[in-house]
Image (spheres, helix red, strand yellow):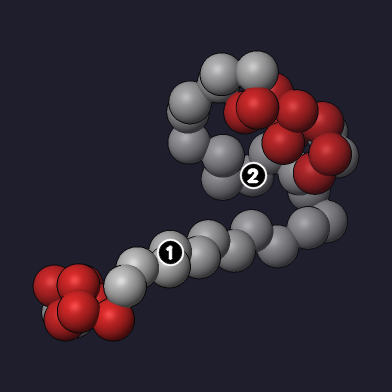
Amino acid sequence: MTPDEARARFRAGLAVPTAGWCPGYTQANLVVVPRDLAVDLLV
């Protein structure tokens, strides 16, 4: 599956883990929150 195909499935409502869906591509996730809430994400 290509990344474009995977994104289309999620835009259509699919909500499942995606690890390994697109061989040959690296998955990265980004979460953006307001600065005043960022401290809540520190480990």
Residue 9: x percent and y percent?
69, 23
Q: Residue 15 at x, y = what percent?
A: 48, 26
Query: Label 1 near label 2: C-beta < 8 Å?
Result: no
Say which amino acid is labelled 1. Val
Classify 22 as above or below 24: above
Find residue 13 and report its horizontal and vertical position in percent.
Answer: 56, 18
Q: Say what secondary structure mark 2 lies in.
A: loop
Q: Which residue is mark 1?
A: 31
Q: Is residue 6 above or below residue 40?
A: above
Disc 2 target residue: 20
Q: Is residue 38 left or right of residue 6?
A: left
- Identify the residue at horizontal 20%, vertical 79% (top origin): 36
Which image quadrant is residue 28 in? bottom right
Residue sitting at 56 percent across and 45 percent down?
Answer: 19
Amino acid at dot 2? Gly
Image-based side of 24 in relation to 9, left or right: right
Location of the C terminus by quadrant is bottom left
